[in-house]
Image (tube, rainbow, N blue to C red):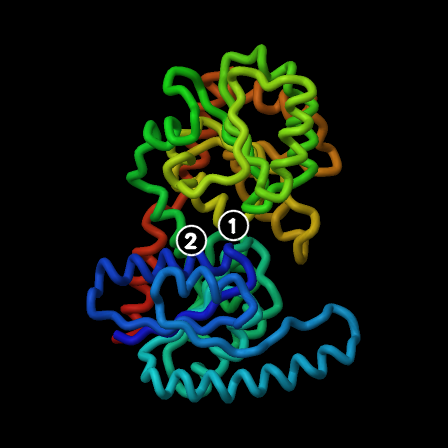
């Protein structure tokens, strides 16, 4: 089987694609892959690091207001379609899957016009412009949230979940804790704001340092590389509690997640897929700076079912953060209820489901 994959712009589009590729490699050792992305996107670095054949096209996204740049985008789209058709023909693709980002537009559209079976994978509860456009042309639409189904044709939309959910299973949580400098005997709270960190979350944590030191739980606080220096300076002024571990970034997130009892984070689709797959309760602080405010809608898909507490950034304070953590982690009944609710929303076999959808299209 020859599989062409396209997805880019953010890790939320790239890492699910890589998780799917790894699942297919386990099931179909002779499978061949071609990843089509953009030259300047994160995918150019991340995918090449995985030794997956990579080709690029030049494409930009539409502006949401009238702009001359949109005319250029249309021209780039048409050129991207022509280039994608040639790449797909040369590769002799059997199936094409788009995992999000505007690069998928010309690639998946080209495949549909060539008569190659096509799938788009929508990670968020509210789809972006590219997937809304492609939904008219593709054979199947795979979604991660029940709420996303309402935006697509019912007859070709299937709930598969996010392939990243499958990759956190079977991890050694004890090893993850120890690798991060946590102890094994006390409950552990993991706080992070995404790969680059989030200043409002950092500010809230810094205001609680003295109070945190009196708590019976421990905290692993991931600042993001960009903010780490400033955070360390602040911490040195007031002193760091013994039960707090501060790091700029961790490379073994699946292991560390497996060792966490409670997660405080943004509400990116990949993070939510991972924590529900593991059945971890969470406090979600959605980024208000994303398209269509989709992170808040992602978060509500969990909080409405009792799997998470929603804390909006505009309401975030150090006191509210500590109060929410205490309310959950110091109440064993609430912890258990939230664990069950989180597990009920999780789709741990998401990678297998998506691969099965691909196989089905090949019949």
Residue 130 vs 350, above or below: the answer is below
Q: Dot 2: what SS?
A: loop
Q: Residue 336: horizontal and vertical position, in percent?
A: 43, 24
| Residue 198 shows in this picture | yes
Indicate the position of residue 309 as horizontal and vertical percent values: 58, 32
Q: Nearer the viewer, residue 300 or 7?
A: 7
As displayed, is residue 331 above or below residue 4? above
Task: Quickly name the residue at label 2.
Answer: 162
Position of residue 308 relative to residue 294, above or below, is above
Q: Is residue 137 visible?
A: no
Question: What residue is drawn where x is 39% and y is 61%?
Answer: 49
In this rendering, position of residue 167 left or right of residue 266: left
Answer few, some or many: residues within 10 Å of disc 2's Cα (few below 14, many 20 plus, some between 14 and 19): many
Residue drawn at point x = 45 percent, y = 39 percent: 275
* Residue pictured at 47% horizontal, 29% vertical: 338
Q: In this view of the protein, which residue sits in the foreground, 267 or 341?
A: 267
Left or right of 240? Residue 115 is left
Which label's residue is closer to the chain start, 2 or 1?
Answer: 2
Q: Determine contact: label 2, label 1, CB under 8 Å.
A: yes
In the foreground, 187 or 300: 187
- Residue that label 1 marks: 269
Figure quadrant of the C terminus = bottom left
At mark 1, the secondary structure is: helix
Q: Position of residue 47 (x, y in %)?
A: 42, 63
| Badge 1 density bin: few <14, some 14–19, many ≥20, Cα 10 Å | many
Using the numbered discs, state the Cα–Cα distance from disc 2 to disc 1 in whole angstroms: 8 Å
């Amino acid at each position: 089987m020859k599989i062409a994959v396209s997805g880019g712009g953010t890790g939320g589009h790239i890492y699910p694609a890589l998780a799917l590729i790894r699942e297919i490699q386990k099931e179909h050792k002779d499978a061949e892959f071609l990843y089509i992305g953009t030259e300047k996107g994160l995918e150019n670095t991340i995918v090449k690091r995985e030794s997956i054949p990579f080709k690029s096209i030049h494409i930009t996204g539409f502006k949401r207001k009238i702009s001359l740049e949109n005319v250029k985008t249309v021209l780039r789209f048409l050129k991207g379609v022509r280039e994608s058709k040639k790449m797909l023909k040369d590769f002799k693709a059997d199936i094409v899957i788009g995992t999000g980002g505007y690069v998928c537009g010309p690639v998946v559209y080209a495949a549909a016009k060539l008569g190659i079976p096509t799938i788009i994978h929508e990670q968020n509860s509210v789809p972006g412009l590219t997937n809304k456009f492609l939904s008219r042309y593709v054979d199947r639409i795979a979604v991660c949230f029940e709420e996303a189904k309402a935006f697509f044709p019912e007859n070709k939309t299937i709930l598969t979940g996010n392939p990243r959910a499958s990759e956190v299973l079977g991890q050694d949580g004890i090893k993850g804790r120890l690798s991060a400098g946590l102890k094994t005997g006390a409950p552990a709270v993991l706080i992070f704001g995404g790969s680059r960190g989030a200043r409002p979350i950092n500010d809230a944590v810094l205001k609680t340092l003295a109070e945190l030191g009196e708590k019976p739980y421990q905290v692993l606080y991931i600042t993001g590389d960009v903010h780490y220096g400033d955070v360390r300076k602040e911490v040195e002024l007031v002193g760091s509690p013994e039960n707090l571990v501060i790091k700029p970034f961790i490379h073994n997130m699946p292991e560390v997640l497996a060792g966490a009892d409670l997660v405080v984070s943004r509400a990116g689709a990949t993070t939510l897929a991972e924590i529900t797959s593991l059945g971890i309760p969470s406090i979600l602080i959605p980024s208000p700076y994303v398209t269509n405010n989709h992170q808040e809608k992602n978060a509500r898909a969990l909080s409405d079912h009792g799997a998470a507490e929603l804390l909006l950034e505009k309401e975030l304070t150090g006191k509210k953060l500590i109060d929410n953590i205490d309310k959950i982690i110091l109440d064993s009944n609430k912890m258990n209820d939230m664990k069950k609710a989180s597990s009920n929303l999780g789709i741990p076999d998401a990678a297998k489901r998506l691969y099965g959808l691909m196989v089905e299209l090949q019949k």
